[in-house]
Image (cartoon, rainbow, N blue to C red):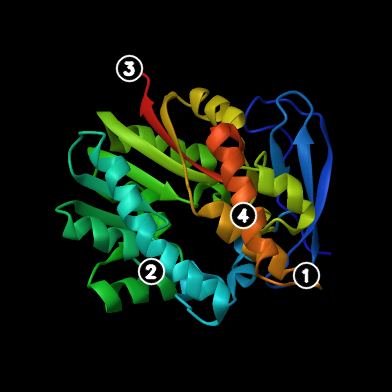
Amino acid sequence: MKESYSINRCPVCGHSSFKHFLNVPDWLVSKEIFELQQCEQCQFVFTANAPLEKDAGPYYNSEEYVEHSDTSSGLIYSVYHVARRAMLHYKYMKIKRLHVGKKLLDVGSGSGYFMNFMKKKGYDVTGVEISEKAIALCKKNFGIKAHSPSEFLEEKLDTDYDIISLWHVFEHVYSYDAYFELFSKSLNNNGYLILALPNCDSQDARMNKSYWGAYDTPRHIWHFTSKTIELFAMGRGFKMIKKHRMPLDPFFNVMVSDSYKDKFTFLPLTLLKGLYSYIISLLNIEKSSSIIYIFQKNT
């Protein structure tokens, strides 16, 4: 039997008593069943039997893992590429309105689309990416070099960043305390840490349960809500400044979720479910499919 990543204390509150939350298959690669557990004190949800970090690589070996493969094969990933172009401008506008400097570190930079977009807007960009395939695509498509996580963790990269961004990345990170310590060291005192994360308290998560695409076990280890990420960051010296919904995520997540089901039809039901989840998020951002969280260091 393969050894699993052991979680003995809640990363959010330090409590050591957990309860079963949900069993979720790895729909993308192995079809193995993974158990989500929930902290009995703060309600934080995590993947309890994720692989060790050294064994995680094979779970990313799929052409459907779009940030590493850049595939546009099939309807879902054709839609993803269209949505990504729209979201690049959305992300840029949210950052521009922070009125901060233009030195940006993007952790989990994938195949480089966000870095390239921001570079064209005049930003001094640096990337960190674990996938050698994505690093090669970044260099080939945009002429931008992305660095390995080890270079970041060993403090070989520059510091004094105005912005550090992680777009749907932090839910994958094993060494969460090491990363947060480096975020604190690497940011200017008035700089911003931006985390975009799926929200397991969203309407589409509740509707789709174990089929919800954004659980993405075992690649996603941590399953945050607005409450638990704020507590997590607060315990590591950061305060939440702003929150923004990611408006296209409910449609994409519902589409991916429905694709895992046997009797799958995209339209019109999938579109209606995505629209319903989106409307709920307009009424309450805490129920958004994914949320952009903007933090600053406590000073």
Image coordinates for residue 218, horizontal then vertical, percent: 68, 58
Front residue of this view, candidates 165 and 264:
264
Q: What residue type is labelled 4?
A: Gly
Q: Looking at the rendered structure, which numbered label has been put on residue 299?
A: 3
Q: Mark 2 points at which residue?
A: 111
Tag 3 or tag 2, which sits nearer the N-term? 2
Q: Name the residue under label 1.
A: 31
Give the Cα distance between marks 4 and 2: 27 Å
Tag 2 or tag 1, which sits nearer the N-term? 1
Q: What residue type is labelled 1?
A: Lys
Give the Cα distance between marks 4 and 3: 40 Å
Say if mark 4 contacts mark 2, CB within 8 Å. no
Looking at the image, residue 106 sits to the left or right of residue 24; the answer is: left
Disc 2 element = loop
Q: Looking at the rendered structure, which numbered label has been put on residue 274?
A: 4
Q: What residue type is labelled 3?
A: Thr
Image coordinates for residue 256, horizontal then vertical, percent: 64, 65
Disc 4 element = helix
* Quadrant location of the C terminus in the rendered image: top left
Give me the residue at 75% from left, 23% from top: 41
Give me the residue at 67% from left, 26% from top: 14
Q: Is residue 227 above or below residue 110?
A: above
Q: Which residue lies furthest to the left in this view?
A: 122
Residue 89 visible to an observer of this rendering: yes
Q: Is residue 166 above or below residue 181?
A: below
Residue 174 visible to an observer of this rendering: no
Disc 3 element = loop
Give me the residue at 63% from left, 47% from top: 277
In front of the other: label 4 or label 1?
4
